[in-house]
Image: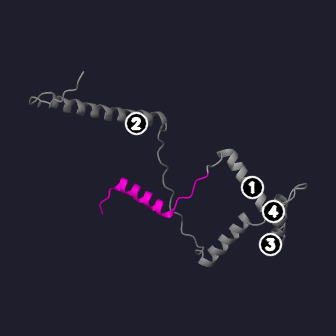
Amino acid sequence: MTKQLVAPSAPAPGGPVRHRHLRRAAAVAGVAALIAAGGYAATTTFGPDSVEPAPAPAPAPAISSTPPLTREQALREMREAIARAYGPQAGTTPVARDQAMREMREAIARVYAPQPGRSPVSPEQAMREMRSTIRGVYGPQPRRARVPREQAMREMRSTITGLYGGGR
């Protein structure tokens, strides 16, 4: 079977093109109606069962005879509240900075100290073990012969010319 290229004929006026636009408009309107119906259903399903009226606003407080707080008083009260909330709790004593630093150093020394029965590994031995592990995971890497600089430059220019064209 061969493919034959034929130019499409122009549709008759008022023919299938007009109907295509009507069908497309009807489909868009149908999708919009489905989205609206889904939104309504979701709102009624997941929305509150009944809407309670908002409470009446509280009456304005009566003017008191106490003077307003000054900035310094407000800051002092705020600092005291923070100290009560985040300060030392009952039954605990504050730890001195030097004692905390000493405890931290001892904890690090316990975690990272040499293990009994193992001697420290030399850097050369560590590199050999690391390379051996990498070879075991990824396989040996083939040795490549060194390419002279001129040959490398020639190959690079050839590749760039092939990719981007030779014109400047």
Amino acid at circle 2: Gly
At numbered mark 1, what does the secondary structure look like: helix, strand or loop? helix
Front in this rendered view, residue 10 or 136:
136
Residue 23 image offset from top left, x and y in percent = 22, 29
Of the residues under marks 1 and 2, which one precedes in the sequence?
2
Q: Secondary structure at mark 3?
A: helix
Mark before the other along the chain sequence, 3 or 1:
3
- Residue under label 1, please give it: 128
First in sequence, mark 4 or 3: give its number. 3
- Given contact means CB atoms under 8 Å apart, are the residues at marks 3 and 1 in contact? no
Residue 29 vs residue 76, the one in the foreground: 29
User: Seen in the image, is 119 located left or right of residue 45?
Assistant: right
Q: Residues within 10 Å of mark 2 (few under 14, many from 20)?
A: few
Instruction: Give the residue at mark 2.
Output: 39
Residue at figure coordinates x 65%, y 47% from the top left = 140
Identify the residue at horizontal 78%, vertical 66% (top origin).
88
Q: Nearer the viewer, mark 4 or mark 3?
A: 4
Q: Quadrant of the N terminus?
A: top left
The residues bearing labels 1 and 2 have C-alpha atoms spaced at a distance of: 65 Å
The numbered mark at residue 97 is: 3
- Between the residue at mark 2 and the residue at mark 4, the CA separation in whole angstroms equals 58 Å
